Structures are given as C-alpha cells and as structure tokens.
Amino acid sequence: MPTPDVLVTGAAGHLGYALMLTLPSLGYTPLGIDILPCGASSLVGSIEDRTFITKIFTDHPTIKHVVHTATLHKPHVGSHTKEDFIKTNITGTLILLEEAANLGQQIESFVFISTTSAFGSALSPKRGEPAAWIDESVVPKPKNIYGVTKIAAENMCYLIHRQTQLPVIVLRTSRFFPEQDDDEDRRNSMGDENLKLCELLYRRVDIADVVKSCCDKPTSEDK
C-alpha cells in the first residue's frame, strides 16, 4: 500500500468513495476506513473503536489530513436507535478528534462533514414570513436525532479545536445521495429524476462540489 497522507472515514459511502477516487488526481494518497470493505486502499473497522483508530495513526505516521464523512444519516432514523446515532455521530467523532489532536502538528487539517439538517425547523418559517436566509448566524433547531447528533459533533469539533488547536473545519452539506427521497409526499409528486433536478434549486448539491469543498485549501480570508 502506498504511503497515505489523507485518512477518509466512511470510505464505502457515497462521499467517502468519491473522495477516494478523486484525491489521487489531486496529488494525495488516501487511506479509507469503513465498517464495510471498500477496496485495496481501505481498512475495515469502526470509528467507535478507539484501539482501531489509534492503530491507524500509529501504523501510518504520514497521515496529515482527516476527512470525516462516516455517519448515520437521516434515512437511518427509522432503522437505528438514538443510542446508535450517539455512538457513531458523537462518540466516533470524539475519538477521531482526540486521536488526531494527540498527534500535534502532524495533522494539518480535520474536515468534519455535517449537514443542513442541523438547521431543522429554522429552515421552515411560519406562514406569511419570508424564506429563511441561511448564514452562520442562524440558530439550529434540529428536528430529529440525526440533526441533534451532528450539532453535538460540531460542538465537539469546536471544543477540541479550542483545547488543542487542532485545525478543524465543519462543512454543512445538503443531500447528494442517489437513493429515492425519504419524503413520501415528494416521491409521489413527481418522478425521481425530475425531483432531484428540481431539488438542485434549493436543497440538493452535486457531490463533485462537496468533494471540491473538502479538498480546497483555505485562503487567508478563511483562517
């Protein structure tokens, strides 16, 4: 296996796999981890297993960047317990943050993939009120355990950054997965391809744009 410099969690997922395919063309050598097997450049294991994560960093001291995409998603709300979400989205993120922070200046960036589901009901103004204008001043009002745990994980990122100076950035992405919409009314209103196209106007993002955002180097204005 080539010497990796980027750790990608959730490498078998849509975004993680896209990163694994794209990073080499940008001059990086990714190492993926997932609970599912996902290719020769990846290892099978859980972000909830601190021993596994510690060994990853110990065995691969050339890792300089972490892109944390592993998560339980909104579609999992119906199939997983709240405790499952807490273990994966909060505890797993904390383990990654702490183990990365333990490496000091070796880690040059930690990218945490969050979600616009964090905004929750803040995206839905009352009847007669104008549409929400979303920026960093909007107070999240998550509506489900997915949003709650992602907000908690974001706060964990901020805490570890303050305590250790680990360079962390949080990206709140909207939906990009190709599966059918999880809203039955929307599914029944129009065909799947048409629905996805319409969603590009207000809630869907091209996965290529998310990959680019993960890989873009910060400018002086971002620091």
Image (cartoon, rainbow, N blue to C red):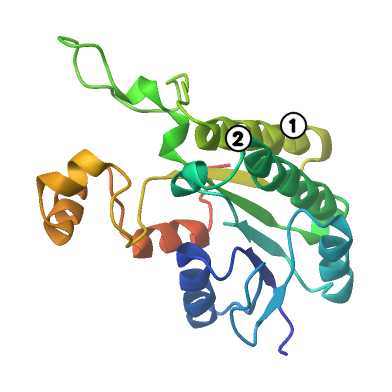
68 w.r.t. 63: above or below: above
Q: Is mark 1 on a helix, strand or loop?
A: helix
Residue 86 in the figure: left or right of residue 95: left
Residue 104 in the figure: left or right of residue 144: right
Across and down, in percent, residue 14 comes to 45, 66
Residue 220 or residue 22, whichever sits in front: 22
Q: Name the residue located 55 percent from the left edge and 71 percent from the top edge.
A: 12
Across and down, in percent, residue 183 comes to 28, 42
> Residue tagged by mark 1?
159
Q: In which quarter of the image is the C terminus?
A: top right
Q: Distance between the residues labelled 1 and 2?
A: 15 Å
> Residue tagged by mark 2?
149
Q: Which of marks 1 and 2 is nearer the N terminus?
A: 2
Q: Name the residue located 45 percent from the left edge and 26 percent from the top edge.
A: 143
Q: Which amino acid does label 2 sit on?
A: Thr
Q: Name the residue located 41 percent from the left edge and 57 percent from the top edge.
A: 210
70 w.r.t. 42: above or below: above
Q: Which amino acid does label 1 sit on?
A: Leu
Across and down, in percent, residue 148 comes to 56, 30
Q: What element carries label 2?
A: helix
200 w.r.t. 151: above or below: below
Q: In which quarter of the image is the N terminus?
A: bottom right
Q: Name the residue located 45 percent from the left edge and 27 percent from the top edge.
A: 136
131 w.r.t. 171: above or below: above
Residue 135 or residue 196, whichever sits in front: 196
Q: Of tags 1 and 2, which is closer to the observer?
A: 2
